[in-house]
Amino acid sequence: MTSEYQPSLLSEADLRAADLSWAYNRSGDSAMPLTELQTWKQRVAQYQATVRLSPPAQQGTLFDLGTEPSPVETLDPFTLSPQNAEFWRGQFQEAGVPALYFVVDHEATVLLYVGETLRSNQRWKGVHDCKRYILSYVEAHRGHDLPVAVNIGFWPHAGADRRTRQALESALITKWQSPFNKENWAIWSTPFVGGKVEA
């Protein structure tokens, strides 16, 4: 195993503030060169575009059993209704439903993160590493005056069984190679996550 250091684009003060203001637009100097940011996004977007265009695998059978295809084959995170990434600050009457959720930059058509939750209205309250990654991502764009539109979409049909949700989440992370999920850090050399990456 080798380790690569991924420098954070944020100061320690910004990292502490990330839990409170991770999706707000802020401007300032970006530690990431413009061409590097654009190339990174283009690579991810091109890969994910091929995933979207690829037809689901069809397995032939002697008998038509009428089974429905897996959500891994049919779920397109880019078509889910986007919500402001600060949705969790709202007042909810209920905790929400079991769901898969997808963090997408709709400006670049890039799926950044795939997650699962038992309570869709509460998942992002409190500490979540992805908030920090997104703050870093947004700040990199603001430093170059680039448009960015990070939203979250929920798929509310994941079911209450945690292992089933996690298996579905894992399969979707593998399929889409979402760069903020740690399983894919070595693929994209994700510059927004900070810390060490094990290859």
Image (cartoon, rainbow, N blue to C red):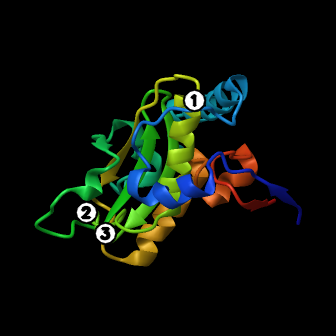
**Nearer the N terminus, badge 1 or badge 3?**
1
* SS for dot 2: loop
Q: CA distance from mark 3 to mark 2?
A: 15 Å
Residue 141 placement: quadrant: top right
Q: Is residue 132 above or below residue 26?
A: below
- How many numbered circles does the render carry? 3
Q: Which residue is mark 1?
A: 143
Q: Which residue is mark 2?
A: 121
Which residue type carries mark 3?
A: Gly
Percent position of residue 104, x then y: 44, 41
Q: Answer whether residue 59 is visible to the viewer in this image.
A: no
Percent position of residue 3, x then y: 85, 61
**Which class describes the residues within 10 Å of circle 2: few (<14), some (14-19), or many (20+)?**
many
Which residue type carries mark 2?
A: Asn
Q: From the viewer's perspective, is 92 left or right of 128?
A: left
Which residue type carries mark 1?
A: Gly
* Pointers 3 and 2 in contact (C-beta within 8 Å): no
**Which class describes the residues within 10 Å of circle 1: few (<14), some (14-19), or many (20+)?**
some
Q: Which residue is mark 3?
A: 159
Q: Residue at x 56, y 32 (%)?
A: 28
**Nearer the N terminus, badge 3 or badge 2?**
2
Q: Answer whether residue 71 is visible to the viewer in this image.
A: yes
Residue nearest the observer in this picture, 123 or 160: 123
Q: Is residue 34 above or below residue 190?
A: above
**Quadrant placement of the C terminus:** bottom right
Percent position of residue 32, x then y: 69, 34
Q: Residue at x 45, y 76 (%)?
A: 163
